[in-house]
Image (cartoon, rainbow, N blue to C red):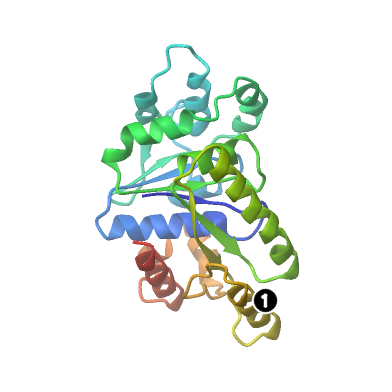
């Protein structure tokens, strides 16, 4: 199964959700790949702690080679690295993704990621794609390559207003490029159950029939420690409440 984690709003927890779900998949014995398409590289930092040593083992090098006429989909394996966690691999981000963007878009390389992930699909049980906070070439490539879309929602009114546009964008990609794409669910992040506004906003989404997933992910300072140590929650505090919420969320997606 190929999931894209997508929201055009920044700071909603895309990388945190991507890496923690992927780490749980791997910990459960599933061969798992994370593809980090955000030039900021938060997922890369989270899973590796530092950039890979090989100068070509990253997403920018993969996309750069798609510009050559003799590029092959299977060449994506040259740009994937192991992480410290068993069964978990990563195609790291790189800052030069920004420099390549215009060239890739003008050459219409929008299907290259899909073709490459289909080529290596039998190797992986789960693929999670982290995206930039924008509907750009890389995000569209990810939506075209994925089967399920996971949408982080951080319980404020700006996020709710943006959600409807986001859902329309996903529907447009599905209609024009990827009929297999479905919204797998809205993931409520940084939820504070004692606060009135988050409860109200989430309930309104449910009342509208939107696919809000449970459990909601709690707000916790432990996640900041997890980021700092480059250890997903399942490897840092497996019995923590937030870890168990991630596990329950992961398991309903199976």
In the rendered structure, the answer to whether residue 17 lies left or right of residue 7 reads left
Where residue 244 appears, as percent x and y from the top left, is 39, 74
Q: Nearer the viewer, residue 91 or 175?
A: 175
In the rendered structure, the answer to whether residue 43 lies left or right of residue 205 reads left
Q: Residue furthest top?
A: 69
Taking the spot 36% from the left edge, 50% from the top edge, the residue there is: 1
Residue 232 in sight in this render: yes
Give the quarter of the figure containing the C terminus: bottom left
Where residue 26 appears, as percent x and y from the top left, is 31, 55
Taking the spot 55% from the left edge, 49% from the top edge, the residue there is: 42
Q: Nearer the viewer, residue 90 or 6?
A: 6
Where residue 181 appears, as percent x and y from the top left, is 48, 48
Residue 231 in sight in this render: no
Q: How many marks?
A: 1
Position of 188 relative to 162 (above/below): below
Q: Nearer the viewer, residue 116 or 63?
A: 116
Q: Nearer the viewer, residue 228 or 145?
A: 145
Which quadrant holds residue 103? Answer: top right
Q: Residue furthest bottom?
A: 194
Q: Helix, strand, or loop for circle 1?
A: helix
Taking the spot 37% from the left edge, 24% from the top edge, the residue there is: 75
Q: Residues within 10 Å of mark 1 (few under 14, many from 20)?
A: some
Q: Write down the residue under mark 1.
A: 201
Where residue 185 appears, as percent x and y from the top left, is 50, 63
Taking the spot 71% from the left edge, 59% from the top edge, the residue there is: 162
């Amino acid at each position: 199964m190929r999931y894209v984690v997508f929201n055009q709003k920044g700071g909603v927890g895309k990388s945190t959700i991507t890496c923690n779900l992927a780490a749980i998949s791997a910990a459960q014995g599933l061969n798992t790949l994370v593809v980090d398409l955000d030039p900021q590289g938060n997922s890369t930092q989270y899973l590796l702690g530092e950039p890979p040593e090989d100068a070509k083992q990253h997403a920018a090098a993969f996309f750069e080679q798609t510009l050559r006429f003799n590029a092959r989909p299977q060449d994506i394996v040259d740009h994937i690295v192991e992480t410290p966690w068993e069964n978990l691999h990563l195609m790291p981000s790189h800052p030069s993704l920004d420099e390549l963007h215009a060239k890739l878009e003008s050459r219409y390389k929008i299907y290259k990621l899909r073709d490459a992930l289909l080529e290596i699909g039998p190797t992986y049980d789960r693929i999670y794609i982290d995206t930039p906070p924008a509907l750009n070439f890389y995000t569209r490539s990810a939506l075209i390559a994925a089967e399920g879309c996971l949408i982080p929602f951080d319980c404020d009114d700006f996020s709710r207003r943006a959600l409807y546009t986001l859902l329309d964008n996903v529907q447009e990609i599905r209609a024009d490029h990827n009929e297999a794409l479905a919204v797998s669910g809205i993931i409520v992040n940084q939820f504070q159950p004692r606060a009135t506004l988050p409860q109200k906003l989430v309930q309104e989404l449910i009342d509208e029939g939107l696919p809000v997933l449970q459990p909601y992910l709690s707000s916790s300072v432990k996640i900041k420690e997890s980021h700092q140590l480059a250890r997903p929650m399942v490897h840092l505090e497996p019995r923590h409440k937030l870890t168990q919420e991630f596990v329950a969320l992961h398991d309903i997606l199976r």
